[in-house]
Image: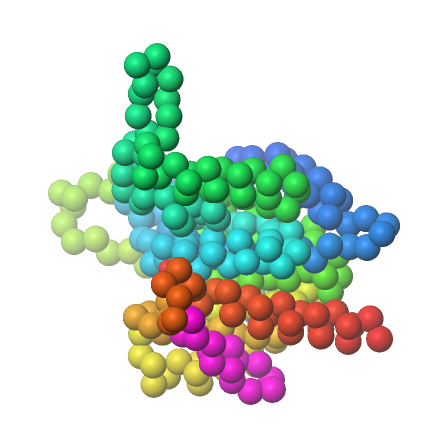
Amino acid sequence: MDSPLNSEIESFFDSAPPLNDRAAISEKLKEFIALNSSESGTRRVACVTSGGTTVPLEQRCVRYIDNFSSGHRGAASTEHLIKMGYAVIFLYRRGTCEPYCSSLPDDAFLECFEVTKESAVQVCQPYSEAVKRAIRDHHAAVAGGLLLKLPFTTIFEYLQMLQMIAVSSRSLGPCSMFYLAAAVSDFYVPWKSMAEHKIQSGSGPLDIQLLQVPKMLSVLRKEWAPMAFCISFKLETDAEILLEKADMARKKYGMHAVVANELLSRKEQVVVVTNNGKIPVYRDKTSSDSDVEKPLTKLLVDRHSVYIKDSNT
Ligand code: PMT
């Protein structure tokens, strides 16, 4: 049936510039999913989205509207999911946190290295263990076929890639999980009505109309990947409205769980909202290198196990 939402979604995709590397992405997805589905049993595969999408204001983009997200949540969750036996498709904003990099210095990458007298490059002593661990763990995950990293920048790239991943993972049935931690733009300028060249500041105040990005959560659930276990995130800055909005989103988009988080406390606590109630999850404060993503992913993996069992009976 042709609903108003479907026609909004259609016109969003029609107006989007085509992905440059669609064929290569499609090939990588096909290989990754085939590798993780075997006759001896399908491995669970999670698509973790991470980082914020941008909305370009010009086709030859100089200016854009950005969405806040460091990508820490998505990167840390990916590491925990892989440890718990999942293969992960990490759909992330270029330049934000990546799995296995959290113990490396953020701003001083070159300070990790030095050039020896023999002109070789070596890791400086204080970073040596952290760099070795990051390289080893990252290599093991990628070479072992457990991690596929797909970068995006704009809202157009993000939603086209999310759709490709969802449709390609259909064959995994209930073993597929969507963990939608990316901060997704709510408003955009359609590509066809966007200025081609840099908008000139001499023409006075800027007056642009932004259209609403259609929420793709219900189409993801109902059409793209109807058997998948779907978790979305709800971010608010006002704690008073957070849980109510998370529960509304769960019902409206048919999510299996919505993770409610408040901007300032998001690294310490979140609340998982399901049809059975609201479960608070806390970071273990007794350990300095703990994160809230560890108990959060554990809880969601347990829920996913129940979902798979119920789907198979
Ligand atoms: O990256 P960090 O700095 O560690 O922070 C993590 C986080 C705060 C970004 C993350 O935990 C989080 O809350 N991500 C979702 C933020 C968000 O976009 O919330 P929202 O209320 O705008 O959207 C709710 C859900 O709808 C999201 O799962 C989003 O994927 C989805 N959405 C949003 C807009 C849109 N047009 N379409 C969508 O499908």
> Between residues 295 and 247, which one lies in front from this camera angle?
295
Q: Main secondary structure of the magenta part?
A: strand
Q: Does the magenta-highlighted stretch encompass residue 272? A: yes
> Between residues 129 and 276, which one lies in front from this camera angle?
129
Above or below, 233 against 193 in this view is below
Above or below, 222 against 85 in this view is below
Q: Position of residue 310 (x, y in %)?
A: 77, 76
* Number of numbered labels in the structure image: 0
Q: Residue at x 81, y 48 (%)?
A: 38
Q: Does the magenta-highlighted stretch encompass residue 75? A: no
Above or below, 300 against 157 in this view is below
Q: Position of residue 180 (x, y in %)?
A: 52, 62
Q: Quadrant of the N terminus?
A: bottom right
Q: Residue at x 59, y 44 (%)?
A: 141
Picture quarter with ligand 1:
bottom left
Q: Which residues are magenta?
A: 269-284
The image quadrant of residue 67 is bottom left
304 relative position to 309: left or right: left
44 relative position to 10: left or right: right
Q: Is residue 37 visible?
A: yes
> Between residues 259 and 215, which one lies in front from this camera angle?
259
